[in-house]
């Protein structure tokens, strides 16, 4: 519905009622055969939106005002909700969040992969819906002469100066407050301005373990532009303060000179403590626990206990008997490969990052697992050059999915079973559309690692067609 004639144009303001949610969390409404996608919102809300783009069959818009709430809408827990870009669905009951995530998986597989009448199991919920993240990235900014520290404002590069957050822990907010106080009391320190491309403080990354009581703080800055090295010296003082007052076990200083706004440094220095954190995955299906070490820039799933459910479910779906040769492509620090190893004859695992492979080898030693071989390199080279023939292959690629050449090479290898783990149902469905020429989907199990957001992990089991 709209209060304005449907012959709208870019720049127009409309009043519409949201009909549904699209994969990825965008809201949508339909108007005279045209779909209007909005940046956010809940089904049932009446909202005011501004049209930002109009194509032949669809338009895009940003919400400017909520006029009436949805009937099942709830009060968000955080005061920053709606401005901070960290959460999208705090105003939706968790049960409803899971229903929409299941629908996203179903829609992607049917629309992109062309599946019909496919049974999709209800998502396995996260053990915790708040305070579940083990890692958060925060940005520095500047407002009215003060240095701010927090998350990006929704759909912008501006920084929301966070006073509360329910995604990581209360300890995280305490660290933010102390860092904010320190940097504002230190005249030599300035916030990086992405537009002007100058300034010193860029990002603050906080990692916390759930089961080993460790905390790593990584500050990412530009070069010290003072003649006396006063900016770098101030950062070392900040690390000592965090160690003394916040029980920070590792403090890392990274330097970033590239102008792109990514929380990653080209050079990294361990100022205090150990170079890595060790976390424990406790499985619920009888598998033995895993201790996993990860360095500052290594990839580790952000929801520890839900990751144990994800990996445990993937192993269950693989139905390993102990005789299989297993491959794990995109293995990260080795969690899934090491979880599979006790139930397999041997495991070959590959990851592009040498640092991740270093952690994976360390993790094999920590867990006394000897039947896993980790290799650093491009997945395509493994599929071309690796001599062993896999019976079961686990794939857990980046959000962009597998390269088309990788999919084709994997099909030539023709393992009996593929367990495809993905954080993006759409790119997963795209790859499965190709794989389905030789494979049949025999199980689909979503697992929620990201409460209060529209993201969902999904596991698809594919068996080689007879």
Image (cartoon, rainbow, N blue to C red):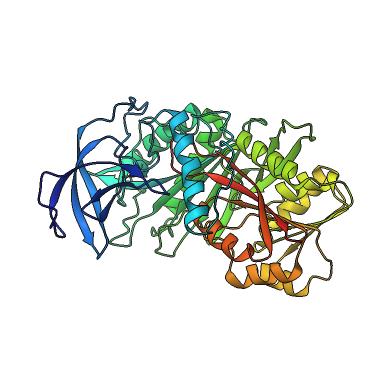
Nearer to me, 43 or 127: 43
Residue 182, horizontal then vertical, whole percent = 40, 37
| Residue 446 in which image quadrant | top right
Give the residue displayed 65% in from the left and 71% down from the top: 408
Q: Quadrant of the C terminus?
A: bottom right
Give the residue displayed 74% in from the left and 44% down from the top: 315
Give the residue displayed 75% in from the left and 66% down from the top: 414
Left or right: 50 as drawn, with respect to 186: left
Q: Quadrant of the N terminus?
A: top left
Asked if 64 appears above or below 428 in the picture, the reply is: above
Residue 258, horizontal then vertical, whole percent = 43, 65
| Residue 275 visible in the current orientation | no
* Residue at the extreme front of the image, as rendered: 117
Give the residue displayed 72% in from the left and 33% down from the top: 283
Nearer to me, 185 or 124: 124
Residue 230, horizontal then vertical, whole percent = 42, 51
Residue 251, horizontal then vertical, whole percent = 56, 43
Nearer to me, 287 or 359: 287
| Residue 301 in which image quadrant | top right
| Residue 285 visible in the current orientation | yes
């Amino acid at each position: 519905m709209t209060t304005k004639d449907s012959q709208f144009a870019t720049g127009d303001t409309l009043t519409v009622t949201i009909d549904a949610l699209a994969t990825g969390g965008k809201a949508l409404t339909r108007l005279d055969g045209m779909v209007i996608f909005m940046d956010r919102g809940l089904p049932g809300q009446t909202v005011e939106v501004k049209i930002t783009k109009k194509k032949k069959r669809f338009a895009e818009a940003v919400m400017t005002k909520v006029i009436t709430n949805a009937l099942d809408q709830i009060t968000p827990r955080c005061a920053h909700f709606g401005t901070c870009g960290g959460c999208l669905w705090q105003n939706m009951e968790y049960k409803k969040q899971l229903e929409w995530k299941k629908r996203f998986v179903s829609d992607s597989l049917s629309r992109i992969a062309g599946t019909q009448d496919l049974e999709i199991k209800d998502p396995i919920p996260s053990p915790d819906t708040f305070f579940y993240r083990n890692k958060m990235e925060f940005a520095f900014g500047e407002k009215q002469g003060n240095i701010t520290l927090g998350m990006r404002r929704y759909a912008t590069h501006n920084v929301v100066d966070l006073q509360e957050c329910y995604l990581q822990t209360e300890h995280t907010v305490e660290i933010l407050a102390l860092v904010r106080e320190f940097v504002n009391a230190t005249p030599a320190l300035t916030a990086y301005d992405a537009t002007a491309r100058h300034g010193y403080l860029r990002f603050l990354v906080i990692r916390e373990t759930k089961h080993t009581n460790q905390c790593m703080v990584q500050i990412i800055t530009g070069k010290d532009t003072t003649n006396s090295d006063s900016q770098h010296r101030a950062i070392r003082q900040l690390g000592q303060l965090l160690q003394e007052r916040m029980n920070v076990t590792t403090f890392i200083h990274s330097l970033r000179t590239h102008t792109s706004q990514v929380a990653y440094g080209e050079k990294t220095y361990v100022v205090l403590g150990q170079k890595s954190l060790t976390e424990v995955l406790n499985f619920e299906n009888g598998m033995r626990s895993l201790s996993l070490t990860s360095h500052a820039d290594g990839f580790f799933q952000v929801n520890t206990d839900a990751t144990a459910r994800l990996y445990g479910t993937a192993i269950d779906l693989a139905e390993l008997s102990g005789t299989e040769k297993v491959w794990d492509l995109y293995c990260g620090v080795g969690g899934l490969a090491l979880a599979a190893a006790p139930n397999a004859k041997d495991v070959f695992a590959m990851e592009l990052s040498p640092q991740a492979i270093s952690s994976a080898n360390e993790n094999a030693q920590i867990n006394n697992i000897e039947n896993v071989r980790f290799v650093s390199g491009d997945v395509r080279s493994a599929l071309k050059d690796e001599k062993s023939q896999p019976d079961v292959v686990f794939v857990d690629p980046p959000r962009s999915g597998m390269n088309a050449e990788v999919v084709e090479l994997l099909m030539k290898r023709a393992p009996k079973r593929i367990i495809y783990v993905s954080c993006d149902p759409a790119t997963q469905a795209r790859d499965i559309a190709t794989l389905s020429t030789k494979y049949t989907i025999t199980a689909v199990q979503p697992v929620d690692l990201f409460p209060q957001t529209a993201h969902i992990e999904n596991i698809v089991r594919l068996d080689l067609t007879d």
